[in-house]
């Protein structure tokens, strides 16, 4: 077991079921026994994280993405506030264990994001339970943020798609005019030179391609309408099933 002041990373994992996405717990303490007790207690859990053990000076400063949660135990007085400020900047869940109730109250005021608990007989159980819950909450927040990002992107795409569908009629009318005039010009073979006729023919062909694209928008509009109706039917069916079950 490394000392509390070491910078070694201690990989641990479930004996029979290796963890693919293993969590990392940063243990910050000047008391080697604190880290040992945390590690020993966590062995009783189904999933055991990797532990990085650091002393209270925290030099060099740990990267925010180098750990998922920090556990802070006994520190030297000179390192106490500095270590907590450093961890606060990392914006990771941090649990502080202390014997001083007044100090805990002060910590809550100074560092609102910290979870502070008093050291008692079963403090290690409390720390592990709080840590697991904090990690679950962090995961939930990440999933919620990701869902919000995806939802915002989908809304943007939907708005753009709706705008394109609404503009389809206007574009189609303009293309019909361009295509019709190009066809009329091509009906007069002796009026234009070969080069000009080639350019007119290109205009007609491009107009036809754009017309085909607009026709696809019509199909997309029908598909979107059908999907909306199907979704509405499913919601109604689920609502009726819920009403019957209740």
Image (cartoon, rainbow, N blue to C red):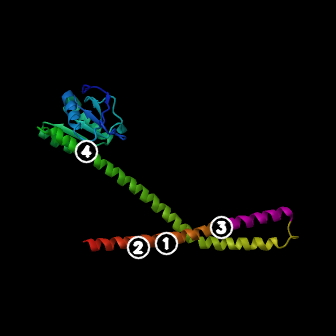
* 124 over 188 or under it: above or below: above
> Mark 4 — residue?
132
Mark with earlier residue (2, 1): 1
Q: Which residues are magenta?
A: 193-210
**20 is within the stretch colored magenta:** no
Instruction: Indicate the quadrant where residue 43 lies.
Output: top left
> Mark 1 — residue?
226
Using residue 176 as the reference point, say whether residue 133 is left or right of it: left
Helix, strand, or loop for circle 4?
helix
Most foreground residue, 245 or 38: 245
**Quadrant that contains the C terminus:** bottom left
Q: CA distance from mark 2 to mark 1?
A: 11 Å
Q: CA distance from mark 2 to mark 3?
A: 32 Å
Instruction: Indicate the quadrant where residue 71 lies.
Output: top left
Helix, strand, or loop for circle 1?
helix
Q: Which mark's residue is nearer the viewer, 3 or 1?
A: 1
Tell which residue pokes out farthest to the right in this image: 190
Most foreground residue, 156 or 76: 156
**x and y percent of residue 9 in the render?**
32, 30
Mark with earlier residue (4, 1): 4
Tell which residue pokes out farthest to the front in this image: 16
Q: Is residue 31 visible?
A: no
**204 is within the stretch colored magenta:** yes
Mark 3 Cα shell of 10 Å, populated few (<14), some (14-19), many (≥20): few
> Mark 3 — residue?
212
Mark 4 Cα shell of 10 Å, populated few (<14), some (14-19), many (≥20): some
């Amino acid at each position: 077991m490394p000392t509390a002041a070491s910078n070694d990373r201690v990989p641990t994992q479930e004996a029979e079921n290796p963890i693919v996405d293993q969590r990392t717990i940063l243990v910050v303490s000047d008391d080697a026994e604190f880290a040992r007790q945390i590690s020993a207690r966590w062995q009783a859990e189904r999933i055991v994280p990797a532990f990085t053990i650091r002393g209270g000076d925290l030099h060099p400063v740990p990267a925010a993405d180098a750990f998922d949660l920090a556990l802070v135990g006994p520190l030297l007085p000179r390192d106490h506030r500095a270590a907590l400020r450093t961890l606060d900047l990392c914006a990771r869940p941090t649990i502080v264990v202390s014997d001083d109730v007044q100090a805990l109250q002060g910590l809550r005021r100074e560092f609102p994001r910290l979870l502070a608990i008093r050291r008692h007989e079963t403090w290690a159980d409390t720390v592990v339970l709080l840590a697991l819950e904090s990690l679950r909450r962090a995961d939930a927040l990440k999933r919620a943020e990701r869902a919000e990002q995806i939802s915002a992107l989908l809304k943007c795409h939907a708005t753009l798609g709706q705008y394109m569908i609404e503009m389809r009629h206007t574009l189609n009318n303009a293309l019909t005019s361009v295509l019709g005039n190009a066809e009329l010009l091509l009906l007069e073979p002796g009026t234009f030179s070969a080069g000009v006729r080639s350019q007119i023919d290109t205009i007609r062909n491009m107009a036809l391609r754009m017309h085909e694209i607009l026709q696809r928008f019509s199909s997309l509009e029908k598909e979107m309408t059908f999907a909306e109706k199907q979704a509405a039917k499913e919601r109604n069916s689920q609502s009726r099933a819920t009403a019957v079950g209740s």
